[in-house]
Amino acid sequence: MHPQGHQGAGWRPAPQQAPDWGAEAIAVGLALANPQLPLSSWVEFPSGRLLFSLPCYSCTAAPKIWLPASGFCVPLITHWPQHPAEDSVPIWIVLRFFHTCLSRAAAEMAASCRIKPLSRVAVCGGTHGNEMSGIYLAKHWLRDPMELQRGSFTVTPFLGNPRAIEKCVRYVGRDLNRTFTTEFLSSAEAEDEPYEVVLAREINQTYGPKGSAQAFDFMFDLHNTTASMGICLIVDSEESLLPMHMCHYIQMHYTRSPCPIYLYKLPGEETYSINSVAKAGLALELGPQPQQVVRADLFTQMRDLIACALDFIELFNKGTVFPAFEIDAYKITGCMDYPRYPDGEISAMVHPKLQDKNFLPLNPRDPIFQTFSGEEILYEGNTTIYPAFINEAAYYEKKVAFAMMEEHTFSIPGLQRE
Amino acid sequence: MHPQGHQGAGWRPAPQQAPDWGAEAIAVGLALANPQLPLSSWVEFPSGRLLFSLPCYSCTAAPKIWLPASGFCVPLITHWPQHPAEDSVPIWIVLRFFHTCLSRAAAEMAASCRIKPLSRVAVCGGTHGNEMSGIYLAKHWLRDPMELQRGSFTVTPFLGNPRAIEKCVRYVGRDLNRTFTTEFLSSAEAEDEPYEVVLAREINQTYGPKGSAQAFDFMFDLHNTTASMGICLIVDSEESLLPMHMCHYIQMHYTRSPCPIYLYKLPGEETYSINSVAKAGLALELGPQPQQVVRADLFTQMRDLIACALDFIELFNKGTVFPAFEIDAYKITGCMDYPRYPDGEISAMVHPKLQDKNFLPLNPRDPIFQTFSGEEILYEGNTTIYPAFINEAAYYEKKVAFAMMEEHTFSIPGLQRE
């Protein structure tokens, strides 16, 4: 029962680095031997997370255990069918050693995560006042709100930054979509504070407060980028269960274009985006579209994506069980600034070979910049990354030529309404 | 000697409509019988212009006469080699009847238009502060001016609107590139006038004054558009001889991409652009490029185009004779606004079938807009037009969804230095 022989049944090849099987085995043992093992689907241990997942859409119908350090996804079976081959002993050891624990845990975890049905959903356009798809969609829905309505929940469209929209600029005082942190939301009112800090508090009062039971159940936030990202689904992290299920649903039902998932939150970082005031959220990022421009093709894509996502919520609310699944997503690890002259002015542009290559592998020694004099600058990292937001207009001031992403496969537990 | 038999020697097929040969013959006769016939290469007559052209690059080495009503380009020969075939009698009549006059005029017109050599050339980047190709090129040339230098003239790079560049916006108070009219240039200083009005006067003092002998000989102005225009060469009108020759030279020598010519001045309109302060000028318009973004591919194209144009000036200054030619160009006839709600807000987007189709024919009843509800709006004009600047970001505020252009063929007389 070597993993390689079971790829079709949900096995995955090992990642680049050989895992520390011993450490993993011990960690799993400690976790599962704990009589206080919670009924959550997650068990934390030193090398990452142990996930007990539900039957998966795409592979086996059996419950599985995912070993994050190795990258393997192992069916959880109480009766081992045969002695494993010599080269799979590490997995065998893990499974055999904790056989009893695993069986008990599997039974406990067989049920999917349960979340209350969603009753109030908000859709925000114009968090950035010059990203026009969402602005014109929100204005359209404010004129004609029927398109957004489903039977089991309310949908409230709104304009995120009205003053910036009026001026057709990203923001007036500071980037609204970086202002939903405790620092700003809980700060005392001050006379000279930026417009967006006041606005963030108002939005937090209306659709939050962030982290409270009174908050809206879900918020969509509609964005455009000048980067050739196509359709991009932005979630804070893979731990956001409902948004990850929504992304999975969109990927399966909106099939005209790839919809990669972008996980924006760095480890330990607080969420800061507008949709973080709701209990859960999803940002749509469509590009390329210049600032201040509305393209009919992207407008239609965004409208269809929201319709698809609302259908998902309706199904969820009506009791559909969404089984566990595995999903690929890009997780941010940092950002790359432009090369600069000593005075701070940029001295190079995104290299033509990197321009428009979002979510494609960038390998060590690939060219990333071209100076104004024509010299190439190469990528000096040691590992392959997947750049995104390449040459986004609004990120020059943030000193970001592109975001550096890693590709990961995540196992997401099942979901159903309480 | 039927025209069809001489296409390779510069003959052109007749246009759609049969010409009025009699009227043309009389008009030519009247024009050439005039003893006051000027030494210009043009003779006006009712059906258009009669052009005496120099030997042409691409066809015969003989002087030619162009008959605009017919579209034929006829070699001017004083000794007719043989009696023409029956079906070319109309041309034969014209040539035979005015044989003496034509010979005299041909001798007079054999010399091309003569213009003084150019000594001072300016290159402006950042007339609009968020069009980055020209801004970064000008900054690059200000750091390292050698690239621009040729032997016979000086080239001065400069930043058009420094305050707008610093803020990375198109303009601060009003569009600088619409401010070089007598109204603004000759207005008295006022305390509340827009920054760009003050700036226009300063630029006019430095590189003009407009219309004076002291003005710079030539000014390039570097622009980007969010429209998919590719490379576009913008001249005020086909009457601008030196810029038209420069465009012709660029089209023949910069062959990596089409370089259509856009004639921006409406009949009777005063020139208003920054390069109108110099004796002659050319604007480069490259796109698509979002505002605030610099793409390496467009940066390189713009740099190469300027190098090509400077080479042309160098050749001209050194005495190269540039013969007459015929050239296609697009001439603006007006602009199309977006459909709007009663409150002035736009109610429709550029139709996906028109988006990105700059300089392609738009026929009556073709779709041009799509409302936010999804309905099509058709083009109601009676004739085929060639839209440009389709969905340009900066033109929403100008109420321009696209410029409406007509395609024309112009005969441009020869050119050489005095």
Image (spheres, coloured by chain):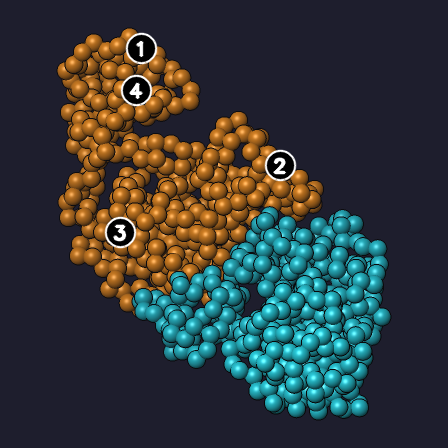
Chain colours: A orange, B cyan
- The amino acid on which the numbered mark 2 sits, given as a three-letter code, is Ile
Tell which of A336 and B383 is nearer to you.
B383
What residue lies at 37% left-to-right and 41% top-to-bottom?
A: A261
Q: Which residue is mark 4?
A: A4
Marks 3 and 4 in Cβ contact (< 8 Å): no
Q: Quadrant of residue B292?
A: bottom right
Residue under mark 2: which chain is it in? A
> Residues at marks 3 and 2, common chain?
yes
- The amino acid on which the numbered mark 4 sits, given as a three-letter code, is Gln
On the picture, is B105 further left or further right than B389? right
In the rendered image, residue A352, in percent from the top left (x then y), is placed at 57, 44
What residue lies at 35% left-to-right and 47% top-to-bottom?
A: A257
Residue under mark 1: which chain is it in? A
In the rendered image, residue B416, in percent from the top left (x then y), is placed at 80, 68
Q: Which residue is mark 2?
A: A377
Marks 1 and 4 in Cβ contact (< 8 Å): no
Residue under mark 3: which chain is it in? A
Residue neighbourhood size for the residue with mark 3, other residues' Cα within 10 Å, grouped as few (<14), some (14–19), many (≥20): some
Marks 3 and 2 in Cβ contact (< 8 Å): no
> Residues at marks 1 and 4, common chain?
yes
Q: Earlier in the sequence, mark 1 or mark 3?
A: 1
On the picture, is B133 further left or further right than A274? right
- The amino acid on which the numbered mark 3 sits, given as a three-letter code, is Cys
Residue neighbourhood size for the residue with mark 4, other residues' Cα within 10 Å, grouped as few (<14), some (14–19), many (≥20): few
Element under disc 3:
helix
- The amino acid on which the numbered mark 1 sits, given as a three-letter code, is Asp
Q: Earlier in the sequence, mark 2 or mark 4?
A: 4
> Which disc number belongs to residue A87?
1
